[in-house]
Each structure stands twice: as C-alpha cells, then as structure tokens.
Image: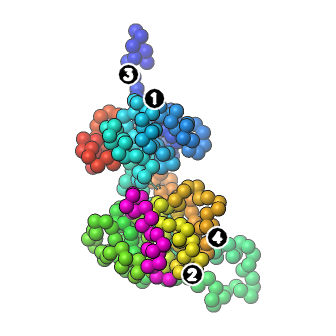
Amino acid sequence: AWARGRTVNARPRVFATRNLPGGALARLAQRVSLEVWPDPGAPAREALAAGARDAEGLLCLLTDRIDAALIKGCPRLRVISSCSVGLDHVDMEAATRRGIPVGYTPGVLAETTADLAFALLLAAARRIVEADGFLRQGRWTWERRWDPDGFLGRDVYGATLGVIGLGAIGRAVAARARGFGMRVLGWSRSLRELEGVEPVELSELLAEAQFVSVHVALTPETRGLLDAAALARMREDAILVNTARGGIVDEAALAAALRGGRLAAAALDVFAREPLDTASPLLDAPNLVLTPHIGSASVATRSRMAELAVENLVAGLEGRAMPRCANPDFADFAAG
Ligand code: DGY
C-alpha cells in the first residue's frame, strides 16, 4: 500500500516455484507479496532466475537448482525454504556465506516415505508388477490358473533387512521390518545404537542382508556409495530398494548386476537424473520395479510439507528462528 509516496506495510516479495497442495500458499499470500510460478511443472533455469531475482524469500522444491550463481543473482534474497527433506539441490555453502537461512522439511515425510520403501520391497519380493502385467496381458489362461511354480518370489517375513542410514526414514523402515519379523541390520556414519537394530559395518550389511534399503542423504561422501564393488558384495539372492537419492547407487552397475543374475531384484523410486532418461540401461534390466520419485506422495504428507516450508519461510522473513533450519551453524535461525 502506498501513502504520501512512501511504502507502508511493504510486504516482503516471495517467489514460489510451484503451487503446493493444501492451503499453505493461500495463507502465505495473506502475509507476503507472493508470486507463484504459473505454468505446470518446474520452471526452467532462466525462469527460476528471473522469478527469484527481486525476491526476499524463495520457496523452492528439489527440482530447482539453487546454486551459487543463482543466489548471487538475487541480491535481496534473505530466506530460502525448500519443500523437501533432501537439500542436495541447494548450495548450502553459498547460502550460508550470504547469511541466508535455508529451511527444509525433515520428520513430516518419514513415515510416508518408509511406507513406499516397504511397498517397493514387497513388490520386488513378491513380483507384484510382473504378475499384474501377466494378468492384464491375457496370459492367465485356464491351464495356468494356478501354477505350482508361477511367480515364485522371496519371503519378507523372517528375512534379514539391512538399513543404510538410520535417520528418521531409516528408523521408520526398521520399525516396519520388525513388524514383519525381520532381523534388522543397520549402518549409518555415526553407527547409532537403536533398539531392535544390530549396528554393523557397511561391508557386513551388504554381505549378509537379503534386503537392503537405502536412506542416507546424497552428499559428496555418499555419492556412488553403492558402486559396482559394493553391489558385488551383496548376496545373489538380495533385493535392493532405493527411496533416498539416485546418485547413491551406480545405475549402470545395478543394471549389469540384475542382467547378470548377480542380484535377485531391485526397486527404485529415485534416479541420478530425473526424469529417467529413456535410454537408461535400467529400463531393460530384469526384476526391477520403478516409480517416479513418489516417496512422500500422500495427500496428508504433501500438505504437511507445504505447511512446514511456509512456516520456515515466514519465520526467516520475520527474523525469527525457523522451525527447521538446515544451515549447520545458524543457531539463531534454528528452533530445533
Ligand atoms: C525430499 O523431500 O527430499 C523427498 O525426496 C521428496 O519426497
């Protein structure tokens, strides 16, 4: 609003790179001057840079690359809030150097993502996608209406699960596994002691587990953690599930291991490059279930993520502690 040529109640300008489920953005619009990227899908690099250029607050997603050049091109930027738990798309160092707090959404999506990890584990173990295709393609004939050796899979109950990364999602997967009567081995960089999880070295986990589920963040240390050598350490009857980040697994090595029968099956929700390239060797690999990065995709969780992302953003703009701030040394911006 303008009065006598001066701005009063100037509301901070916020650019949101996507409309979000639930009512969080509508409520945000009452407090800030909000511009939401209007087109379907993610803005291209130039559109992102143009939208963010004059913004004080940026509400982004994991599809937006917030690198040092982009941050440099936004001189008024004071707060970044990502509607994601992963932050490998944000140059945290560049943001921190500029004194920009970065909000994220840990915790609220852990159970939903663990549900998907378990759904994928079960789907791969019991060949559900393959069986569905068999039926739909009209191959379920009278003669084969119950085959003694049709679609034989692996038992999940009683098997050994290795959980790589024991943050909130890894722990939620371990809890589900215990409900299935599984033995749970766990590895994390900090070798956490958790009830019902046997802490082991990564090499031991890979060698012993019949199911391996990946739950570490993608960092320079975890990029390529499951490379050809690590995959070769796994049992031939093992099943690998990845709902974390694609860059943690060497996709070409995984496709080769599946083709060569050196790994029983895998299920992936995340890929090194998304969307998955139509020329990816994964698309021809056998015994592989694929989903398009839907780990947190439940109605309730996506709207909880949006709420938390907006709370982080507003707190940062008002100079208050963010409920969830990712900058390691920003005690003033982090409430917990
Ligand atoms: C995240 O928030 O980082 C997840 O990958 C989205 O489901």
Q: Secondary structure at mark 4?
A: helix
Q: Are marks 2 and 4 in contact (CB under 8 Å)?
A: no
Sooner in the amino-acid sequence: mark 4 or mark 3: 3
Q: Given the image, on which type of amino acid does mark 1 rest?
A: Asp
Q: CA distance from mark 4 to mark 3?
A: 58 Å
Q: Tell me the quarter of the picture where residue 332 sits.
A: top left
Q: What is the image's colouring? A: rainbow
Q: CA distance from mark 4 to mark 1?
A: 46 Å
Position of residue 186 measured from the top left corner of the image (x, y, whole percent): 34, 73
Q: CA distance from mark 2 to mark 3?
A: 65 Å
Please state if 218 lies on the left or on the right of 293 as rendered.
left
| Residue at horizontal 58 percent and vertical 80 percent from the top | 260
Circle 1 Cα neighbour tier, 10 Å, few/some/many (<14 / 14–19 / ≥20) = some
Which mark is in front, 3 or 1? Answer: 1
Please state if 229 lies on the left or on the right of 166 as rendered.
right
131 over 17 or under it: above or below: below
Position of residue 86 measured from the top left corner of the image (x, y, whole percent): 42, 54
Sooner in the amino-acid sequence: mark 2 or mark 3: 3
Circle 2 Cα neighbour tier, 10 Å, few/some/many (<14 / 14–19 / ≥20) = some
Q: Tell me the quarter of the picture where residue 211 sits.
A: bottom left
**Badge 3 residue CB within 8 Å of ligand 1:** no
Position of residue 25 measured from the top left corner of the image (x, y, whole percent): 47, 39
| Residue at horizontal 39 percent and vertical 71 percent from the top | 163
The residue at which mark 4 appears reads as 284
Magenta stretch in the rendered image: 216-237
Quarter occupied by the N terminus: top left
Tell me, yes or no, whether the highlighted magenta stretch contains residue 116.
Answer: no
The residue at which mark 3 appears reads as 9
